[in-house]
Image (cartoon, rainbow, N blue to C red):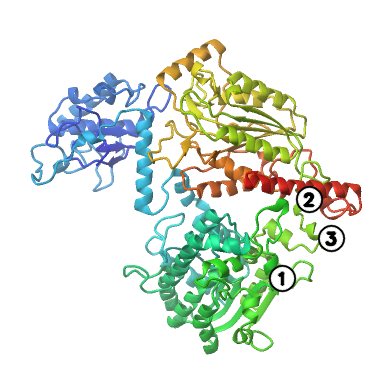
Amino acid sequence: DDIAQHLTIDPQGLSWTGRNWNLPPASQAGMNGSRQKGPFMIEIVGDFDDGRDPLDGLQRQAAIDVVAAILHVRQLGTGQVFFHRDLGSPKSCPGSGVDKVLFINEIQAAIESMAAGRPGGARRKPAAKGRAGAGARGQLPFGREFLLGHDVTIDPGEAARGYEAWEVPEHDLAAGAIQADARARARVAGGASRDLSAVLERTRPEWEVLRPHVVNLSRGLLSQGGQFTMPDGSIDGIVEAIRQYAHTTDEPRVMMHAHGGLIKETDALAYALGTRQWWLDHGIFPVYFVWETGAFEVIRNRLGLGRGIGDWWDRRFERFARPLAKPLWDDMKDYALRASSPDAEAGQAGGAWIFTQALSSLVGNPPPGKSIALHAVGHSAGAIFHAHLIPALVEAGMKVESLAYLAPAVRIDLFKQLIVPRLASADLRHFEMYTMDEEAERGDDLVKPLGIPVYGKSLLYLISGAFEPEDRHAGILGLEERLTADEALVALFEPAGRHRLELSHARGKPHNPATRARKHGCFDNDDATMRSVLATIAGASTDIEFSLQDESCNKAASRDLAGWYGAGAPAVLTGRGPGSRVAPGRALCVGIDGYPTSPLLGCVRDAQAWARVLGDLRFDVTTVLDREATRQRVLDALGTLVESAEPGGMLVFQYSGHGSQAPDLDGDESDRYDEALVPIDYQSGALLLDDDLADVYRRLPDGALLTLFMDCCHSGTNSRFAPFDVRAARGDERRRFLPLTPELEDAHRQYRARAGSPRPTSPEESLPGLIHFAACLDDQFAYESDGHGHFTRVATADLAAAVSRGMTNEDFSNDVAARVIALGRPQTPRLMRLPATLAGRALLAGTASPAPSVGPQGAAGLPAAGDPAWDDWCLEFFEAGAAHWRARLGR
């Protein structure tokens, strides 16, 4: 009840109800009427200003029909029709392109047709029976009781609402506030993002093929939000798909997969999409449980973990991680339990339990002559999920042929309680486990180039030492040292028992042909492991490679034993070493704090931090700070930078300061605003528009690359509204957005009238050679606190390490975004759309930089030991590592 329109007419001519028709609108001060009598307001979807959307076709006819019908029913004349702009609004609504005289004449003609008994909507196609179109028989398609008037009864005991509270000033900041508030309400009400990007993600058409294969869960219940909803009948549809599959094969087999805890919903769906056909091609029907691991998502973001990376500062880090990680880990385990429970929450059954009940009917009554075999595969925390699902399947009257655990994160005592009895009773016939040997477990991500902080052991050790209730050394099944210390467990596996244990070996040992994964997160896409699992389920081996590959996993499993660096990491360490991917180049770093209005506190320090880390990477850095950073000085320095470029070289332009929006004076912006950087002399109107910068970027020589790191607000591309965030600042936190006052807008126009406008550019234009990292999305603020911008603090801490690993621009952007989001402000860094030729390129890699190669020099293109170049390379390696640590420690 905080909206104006009672009815909205969409471009297809359909009418949507909005505000209660018995209430006056919440709109414009002095024009809303009262609770007993007020205007009826209609909104038409579109931008109908001159030169934009035409108001025509079915949408125009619907608007005419509806207005005519209202006037006819209430016995009013066209003099009672007002445009929004007639009521004192600064807006042009319904649009400057809508001729009111012509529109009123068309309404009058429709009213006259109604009065004569002729159908006012004759130009439309007849509506379906029971859904007459507006005006089809001279009346509204709604009951008269909904219309304002004396035949409506108002409960005198109902408290009248003060509508003046909703009379907001009609300008863009207020509209942005309403938009932000609505998004926040939707997220709270629906438990999931309602932002457009998320909505589009949820409706990705390629995911529709997963409907017969995915059971999506949230808090153990069938998901009603997120990226992949489970509408009524979803489980029945999956079981029916299994039934139809069973008719087509002599030996129907169902594989039930539960993913690990370091994976978000979209990644789990992508995994299902990428592997589904591989299983089907081998005659096996896959079902994927995409289950609640949101708690672990928070752990990953807060602690800086990534999929397959569980290493930090050993015991110190375990103590640091415990207060945050333990309750969240407990929540995730609870969701695994709920999923297979008949009473998960408030009397609702868990989604996996619903699946087992529906599946039991089919397994108990399969197609004639068939027997449906069930198999389960659980990776990491997915082992906890299956520890509860297997008993639920058995209790529903089914047997499970095999269970495969991949690097299981389940507690040993839970495994003994829930799984071992089913093995003893033969309700679960075969169990096999794939995990790393002790040496490999302790070596998982043990060494990272450039001295990145490490935990020193695998993720399972972190779970054992920090996430479980014990202070230390909780028994986790996937840890070989915990497993071998338990005689009862050892007795399960060959040669003493009939079940199978396969260990992948540390680097330097021969590979186990059954599993080659040397990182915790790599088991579920390791080719050897997944072929071994398939052989158990299908009863035969396959020559077809597993359908998903992870390059980082392939490197970890490399047989190259030329040295500890043979996995390829240090081959990309510095800007000068042989075989390096980093292109030595030049950089410009700009930071502005001392604005006459809205000063900032962290931008100069940002520029200095960027200068240090880029200098350590052997860039020649120029800084322009504070009072020096006039519009002309920044343009001159940027022009000098670009003109110094050579084909194959790498340049960097970094900016920390205010961003803003300025009225678009040349008509190249669809949202009518130019993005702008705000130099120190902005009060004269001397803004640095996106068009100004593009003029300089276009002078970049062919083959040269320019990477931008922009720690400011970039609003305007996707929304005409300036960002608006009503949350209170925390501590010294500030937002890097400077809204232009009317005086500054006038100064901007006068400045442009004198200086002329640059060549227009599209905000979506991908300029050759340009790689653009932005600190936030177009409708967000960039924040600073504690002396640095949030984006800069994260990006500079990770830059050297990311370069050393040869990380792509896309992956670096994703990692930085995850860590900035974890800081708790609505700020999502992004990598602007890249030209096709730059997709997949390594961070700060020049086009002429050679990729690592293995040859007579040594592993991965390094000079051979004893060569003087090797001494230089080692010196640069350790210098870079020390520089990274100094940057992290602020020294």
Circles 1 and 2 in contact, beta carbons < 8 Å: no
Closer to viewer: mark 1 or mark 2: 1
Give the image location of residue 362, x and y in percent.
45, 77
Question: Is residue 588 depicted above or below 686 in this figure?
Answer: below
Residue underneath mark 3: 562
Would residue 276 be found to the left or right of residue 146 on screen? right
Question: Is residue 146 depicted above or below 403 in this figure?
Answer: above
Compare residues 700 and 828 and report the one nearer the observer.
828
Residue 439 is marked as: 1
Quadrant hosting residue 509: bottom right
Give the image location of residue 131, x and y in percent.
25, 46
Residue underneath mark 2: 571
Give the image location of residue 829, x and y in percent.
54, 42
- Which residue is at 57% across, 68% downward? 465
For marks 2 and 3, the one nearer the N-term is 3
Q: Secondary structure at mark 3?
A: loop
Q: Amino acid at mark 1?
A: Glu
Question: Is residue 172 depicted above or below 508 in this figure?
Answer: above
User: Is residue 224 at all visible to an observer of this figure?
Assistant: yes
For marks 3 and 1, the one nearer the N-term is 1
